[in-house]
Amino acid sequence: MKALNKFFMGTTLAITLLGASVAWGDPSIVGGNVIVERPEVDTASNFYLIDTNHPLNADGMLDQWEIFAKATASPAAIPPPVRLVIYRQKGDRFFVVGKSKAETPNPGYNLFKLRPKIKVKAGDFVGAYYPNTGSISFSYDPPSSPNTSDFGNGNLTGTTIFGFPDPNRIPFQFTLSSNRHYSIRVQGESSNKK
């Protein structure tokens, strides 16, 4: 039994039962929020965000990311493409340390493999970019007005920070913030794992 436990320790196993994937084991790196349907979806385009609610918990390599996507058009349309972006904070600035290719999600839960994997450090933040009207569902926590006059409160802990791309400035300057939780999460394997 000890040999069996040692073999499975730190390993994620998955099987398919009636079309559903069931996984055992815990990834050693996680970051982002619980993936559930949330009541809101951004209507902005060409838009970047950093969700600072739950930073990555360890150094290592990310190998997958998940989102809960919603279409913003009626009737239910396919959500637009979205990219995972990983940020690192240095002082009051945020730098891009990795990003995925653009993926077109289906409405509802989506899991995407990262090829190539993204090297991360503990404390990095999960973010996203969408070139068209947004698709990732989010909720206000605590509930607050979506009115832009409530943004920019200067509290960057447990908030989402927004920015618009400027091709002449890297990293991007983030100017607004709000208390939101996005349905986006990453997983991977820690480099400290034994």
Image (tube, grey):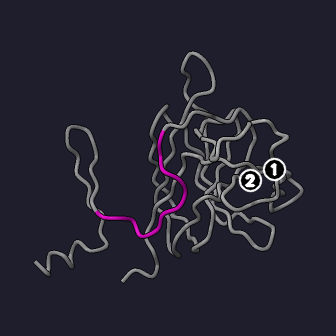
Q: Disc 2 on helix, strand or loop?
A: strand
Mark 1: few, some, or many residues within 10 Å (few <14, many ≥20)?
many
Residue occupying image coordinates x 68% and y 36%:
42
Image check: 190 left or right of 24?
Answer: right
Is label 1 in contact with label 2 (beta carbons under 8 Å)?
Answer: yes
Q: Residue at x 72, y 69 (%)?
A: 89
Task: Give residue 72's position: percent from left, percent from top.
Answer: 63, 26
- Give percent across and percent down for residue 51: 65, 54
Write the start and end of the magenta stretch as one range.
25-36
- Which x, y percent locates residue 141? 62, 47
Q: Is residue 80 left or right of residue 89?
A: left
Question: Disc 2 marks which amino acid?
Answer: Ile
Type of amino acid under label 1: Leu
Q: Nearer the viewer, residue 115 or 37?
A: 37
- Asked whether residue 30 is drawn in magenta, I would say yes
Q: Residues within 10 Å of mark 2 (few under 14, many from 20)?
A: many
| Quarter assignment of residue 45 | top right
Numbered mark located on residue 161 in the image: 2
Say the numbered circle drawn on residue 92.
none
Residue furthest out toward the top: 75
| Residue depicted at 81% across the width and 43% down the height | 150
